[in-house]
Amino acid sequence: MIDDDARRQEPDTMSAVPDDTMQDNAALRDELSGMRRLHALQVSLAAQADARIALQEITALACAFARTDCGCVQLVSAHNSEMELRVYRGHDERSAFVQQLLKDGFQATCDTVRRERRQLVIEDIETFTPLKGTPDYEAALCSGIRAAQFTPLFNRAGGLLGLLGTQFTVPYRPAEHELRLLELLAWTAADYIERHRAELALRTSESRLAALSAASSEVHYRMSADWDEMHQLTAGERAADAMATSRSWIMDYITAEDQALVRSRIGAGIRARSAIVFEHRVRRADGSIAWMATKAVPALDADGRITEWFGAGADVTARKQAEEHLRESEARLTYVLDQVPIGIGLFDTQGRFTYRNPQLREQLAERVPSRESVQEQPRAGVDQQGQAVAIQEFPCARALRGEDTTVPVDFVDPRDTQRWLRITAVALREEDRVTGGVAVVQDVTVQRQVQTEVGALAERNRDILESISDAFYGVDAQGRFTYINQKAELLWGRARDQLLGNLLWEQFPDSIGSLPYQAHVRAAQTRQVVRLEALSPALGYWVDTSIYPTNDGGMSVYFRDISDKKRADARLRASEERFRTALTIETVGATYFDMGGRLTDANDTFLKMSGYSRADVEAGTLSWQALTPPGARDLCERAFEELRTKGSATPYERQYLCKDGTRRWALFASKRLPDGTGFEFVLDITDRKLTEAALREVQDRNAFLLKLSDALRPLPDPAAIQGEAARVLGEHLNAGRAYYVEVDARAQQYVVERDWHQPDETSHARRFALTDWPMPWLLDAQTWVVRDAATDPALPDDQRAAYLDNQIAALIVVPLIKGGRLVATFVVNQRSARNWNAAEIRLAEETAERTWAALERARAQGALLESEERYRVILESALDYAIFTTDTRGHIQTWPPGAEAVFGWTAEEAIGQHIAMTFVAEDRLTGVPQREIEQAHYTGGAPNVRWHQCKDGRHVFIEGATRPLRNGSAEPLGYLKIGQDVTRRRQWEDRQQVLLAELQHRTRNLMGVVRVVFNRTQRSSKTIAELALIYNDRLDALARVQGLLSRLNDGDRILFDELIRVELSAMGAIDAQGQGDRVTLDGPAGVRLRSSTVQTFALALHELATNANKYGALAQAGGQLRVRWHLLGTAKGIRLRIEWSETGVHMPAPGEAAQGSGYGRELIERALPYQLQAETTYVLGPDGVRCTIELPVSESMRLESDDG
């Protein structure tokens, strides 16, 4: 300490001391005093076992450093982020501050410090935004606290151990030297906490080890280094026949047959200084022979020599006997299995086959499929439904997990993709433990080929089933629906998604016991085709059903509505019955005529059919020529000719004219009677003809709808779909126009994007106001049909006028009501009147519905494509993010520009490669890529925060994650990797840690330098005045060094010769003119150093000078220091070479530890090459240190030869 008297002895030019200097001196005195108190605390903590007392002492010193009465320490639990121990000082335990500390541990403050990882100084809590609104904020203000500081306690790994805090009742900020002392105190507290926790863990571990030894069934022993003597032997209560310690233990306990083996294994272990593991026989106390499993581990001293052995032995006699019995049993089993014609194998828990019969050797490799890789790819497995099976669900893998299942899985051999193997497996157990499994393998190549052909055939059949007019469904052996075509959906009025997979009779319980139900049962039992026409309880009308049993135990069922046919058949049967009794019951028309065709007689039935009276017949004016329409007269003449020549005419069908002019259909069958008169039965078949016409209409409609579906299916554009649908329908109906109208509710408009029209018609593709075509009647979802706009009485006058003005005489408007509102209409119209029939109207309705469905599909696909395009644009613009996908095995599938920008590989180079290529070599060797995929698979995500390797060999630091891609199934489709390149930030964080360590070390060195300078000055000074003068001079030199370093932020360049002189001057090795009796400086002046390198480089010079001043050339009487420097021109640019050479120094003898902490050497040999791209050497010579440093200098430097 420098007092005021000493300071008054300085020259007059220094009599006016600035206030800043006085404050700096006071701060220095406080800091030196604090360092002494900190040292005393460290000594006290070294012997303190009670953590709470230790933390109380730390809290007291923190309050002293911060000049306050209030402080606290809180620790984070070693197992989670919660506070576990809290110590406070100067606070009322009933205050809100203490209650918050004990309850929540000031969690908000702790989170802030944990996030920022630095000392938190709150000068005024009322203005400190991050804490406002938190319980910490309210508790502090309620307790009268206005300012605080919290210093984090970090362990050596950088983890947060707790907080050291001090509080103030007024707004306040501690001085910088007080904050530094608090940081040093925090480091001391962190060291104590780590040591205390380690000691607790050690005591717990030792207690557990002792308990384990006492409870174990094994024998534990200690042997001499050469195994000649057994030092100690212990055994638990369950250890039987434990040996006693003995020098002749080998002869006493080891059988003669195994003594050579034991000595050989012991000798090998001694030579290799490694563990000894073997099994051997021993003599029991009763003379019987037992087997012992022995393992011994050597204990080594600091030089690697064996001091003794620690071993354990377990009785394995029962296992050995069981193994012998097992070998005999396996020999018998092997003989039997070798004769089996299918592949059979036994495998262990690692998936390796322990036995394979000849058939299995030909089928599989050495390992089960879930553990085997063929041509660097695992086998592909599928289940019996053709679905891919994950490798962990392979039969052998499931058996090893102890799952009892015989569900087979088919595998394709990567070496021969045409060969398929079917495998089942079951687990082998010993009690509840799985010891392996049995695999049964069959070659199912031919079966798979047949299944493939059957599958293709089934796909073709499916297309046929969807296009046929009959309804169809399939059920499996249990009666569950496996397939339902569209026609069945339509007849039942139920969607197939509601029925598939459900039981047939559960969905139609009203049909149980009916004729269709009995037919299904009969077909299932007899496995014969059953055909049935019956009334369906489910539909309420007659159906024609054909039931075909299938080979898999199920049934294929065709059915169709035959209500019309049944009615026609009934009429036909009735007509035939009338025909048989025509003359008596008058149910079939019957006529008599001469060979000229004139009717001579007819029964009442015919008269009713034709509308004529008997008087008309008797008048002789009726003839078949008059009753026959012109189009059927040729057919009638041929029938009469056949009747004249053959005596009978083949029955034929044709129309005939009724008296009222209408036409009806009839079946005619005639025969010539012996008297030459013709007789003819006339059966009216008009209803059947109408039914057949309806059937043709259905067939034509299905053909049209198939054509429409084929036309719309490939179209992605909604407007194109509207136009194509309008064209197909318009051409089919030969109408004038056809178009799809969408309702734009927001714009209150009808919108026609595209229409179809005949060449001589105008287009209606435009927008119409809703008010121009008011059609409120469309809201009832009924199709609007106008056959003649000029005469239709249902058409309002304003609509009639609008239609006629637009040359529309006939039209069909089909409304589409979705969600209770009109969304669109489909319109067909023409300029001439037209009697639209029901078939045409139904076609328009079908077309409207299918057009709406096709538009919805196209718009959904368009939205999907738009979403994918946005995704692509995002990926291409995120150049600082590596976002890409892989398959389930980790092979890259997509590689956007962001991934290429981060890693350097192009998409062509990366796609198909494994993600391991982006990991550094250390992570690849330890399996990190695969573990990351497995974690993402089982947990839904895996963090990826680590260094990665780029194409050019450089490393980048990535922060991201890996997540599985799923489409709703349990197994992922692949994985998504997202990572941000934060290399620059990581480098700055690493640099910050280095600087913090350097600052702490430099502070300690600075205190040491001050002490050494003072001691040396004191020894060489004769008086107090001389001591004060010289010591002040050297302190000023030391301050100049710090002043040079503080100029780094000013943008100046520091000269090397100035830096070395200031550093040595601070040590007292040279005077103000750079002269010293034991120091030689040799080199050019004005060498400018890079600003970015000065701080680290100056620290290295400081370490060299400090070590020389403490232990080397400047500390010993005969020592000499020579520093030479010069510039070099190299391929790397202009570099400065410094040679530091100490001589005349008494060095430690070989084998003795070098003096000093070693920090300076580590800085020179590791930090300078890494941070400054320097080349260094550091050698402890026989008489002193030899060190060279070669580093780049400022770009403004030029060699003298460059100027020439």
Image (cartoon, helix red, strand yellow):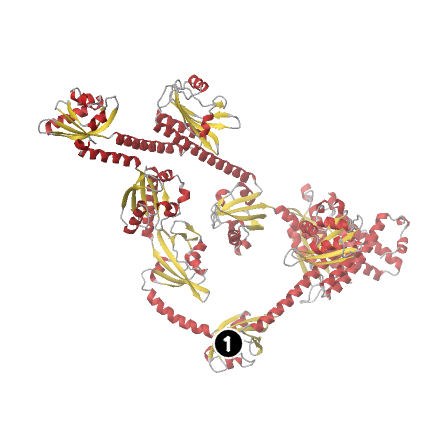
Image quarter for residue 225?
Answer: bottom right
Tell which of 1054 and 97 is nearer to you: 97
Tell which of 134 and 568 is nearer to you: 568
Q: Residue furthest left?
A: 675
Residue 526: in sight, yes or no? Answer: yes
Say whether residue 614 is left or right of residue 18. left
Image point 84% across, 50% down: which residue? 23
Compared with residue 1204, is residue 845 higher up or lower down, i.e. above or below? above
Say whether residue 148 is left or right of residue 535. right
Residue 720: in sight, yes or no? Answer: no
Compared with residue 495, is residue 916 higher up or lower down, i.e. above or below? below
Say whether residue 883 is left or right of residue 536. right
Q: Quadrant of the N terminus?
A: bottom right
Q: How many marks?
A: 1
Q: Count residues near mark 1 (Cα–Cα under 10 Å), then give few for <14, some for 14-19, many for 20+.
A: few
Q: Quadrant of the C terminus?
A: top right
State the image coordinates of residue 146 (x, y, percent, origin top left): 78, 49
Determine whether the residue tagged by mark 1 lies in a helix, strand or loop: helix
Image quarter for residue 714?
Answer: top left
Say whether residue 1191 is left or right of residue 298. right
Tell which of 577 and 965 is nearer to you: 577
Image point 37% across, 23% down: which residue? 735
Image quarter for residue 193?
Answer: bottom right
Q: Residue type at mark 1?
A: Arg
Q: Which residue is mark 1?
A: 263
State the image coordinates of residue 883 (x, y, percent, origin top left): 54, 44
State the image coordinates of residue 66 (x, y, percent, origin top left): 79, 54
Tell which of 695 and 710 is nearer to you: 695
Image point 53% across, 28% down: which residue? 746
State the image coordinates of residue 978 (x, y, percent, origin top left): 55, 46
